[in-house]
Amino acid sequence: MTVEAGPRMAAGARGAGPVAYWIGAALGTAAVLAVNTTATIAGEAGRHWWANFILLPTAGIAAVGGSMMTGRGVRAAAGYTLFCFATIGFAVGAILMFGAMGRCWPLMIVLPAAALLGTVRWWPAEPAGRAVHGAFAGVAAVTLALGAAFQLRVGGGEPVERAGYHWWGWFIALAGVVMAGNAIWLRTDRSGYRISSATLLIGLGLAAVAVGLRAVYRW
């Protein structure tokens, strides 16, 4: 699978200079200090000090990953992967520091979805790859919206469900529509994967729509 050439996706790699590493390290240190300071003011740092064993390494890894993202090609992709995993880990550490997992658990849906959505930076050139990648990115966008909706309800002190109504099923159905809709990229595909790729996307999409509607209407 090839990738479209562009100013951000040109072949080759360019090493990140020492300035990028130092900037990343400074930002990571500032983030750890900010979390600890805020938690101290809130009176939580003394009880959850052990969360620093999550915050410190993930901040360092995120700094390295962020500096690698200034390069190109495989280096930038590897840096993005490191940065996303470390950022999610840092978020977990921060939530534990504040003892707020019960109020902030939807972020564990939002952050991975945002990380997957960010891979659109590496958009494939082939129609088959574009269709599959677009399907995953689209589902990630819907998942991000679902996590945000959960967070608004949980953060506002409201139950996720009201009177047993599974409203989140609409998001599953929407994800299915997005996945099936990405089969449109295959209209210009001249490879032997056109039919199989379209069947996979449309089949999974229709299955997701059925699951979502079943959750909403209790079929």
Image (spheres, rainbow, N blue to C red):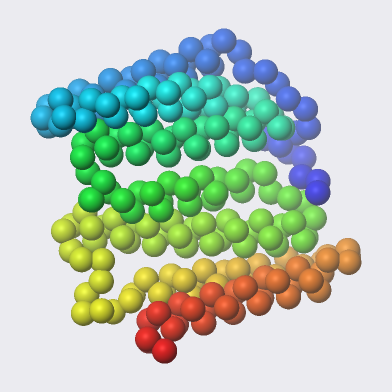
Q: Is residue 194 above or below residue 154?
A: below
Q: Is the residue 17 above or below the residue 76 in the image?
A: above
Q: Which of the pair 49/189 is nearer the observer?
A: 49
Give the camera-side residue of 184 and 166: 166
Q: Nearer the viewer, residue 25 or 49?
A: 49
Res 129 seen here:
yes
Q: Residue at x 66, y 76 (%)?
A: 202
Q: Nearer the viewer, residue 70 or 64?
A: 64
Point 33% across, 75% down: residue: 167
Q: Residue 39 appears in which quarter of the rendering? A: top left
Quarter of the figure with the C terminus: bottom left
| Residue 7 falls left or right of residue 189 | left
Q: Is residue 155 above or below residue 174?
A: above
Residue 7 seen: no
Q: Position of residue 121 (x, y in %)?
A: 63, 43
**Direction bottom: furthest residue:** 219
Residue sitting farthest toward the top? 18
Figure quadrant of residue 178: bottom right
Residue 204: horizontal and vertical position, in percent?
62, 73
Q: Residue at x 27, y 37 (%)?
A: 96
Q: Is residue 117 left or right of residue 75?
A: left
Query: In the visual, does 165 lie left or right of 8?
Result: left
Question: Image height check: is 32 above or below 121?
Answer: above
- Please give the name of the residue rendered at 60% of the width and 46% of the height, measured from the top-left corner: 119
Q: Position of residue 128 (x, y in %)?
A: 77, 61
Residue 218 lies, in percent from the top left, at 37, 86
Q: Quadrant of residue 52?
A: top left
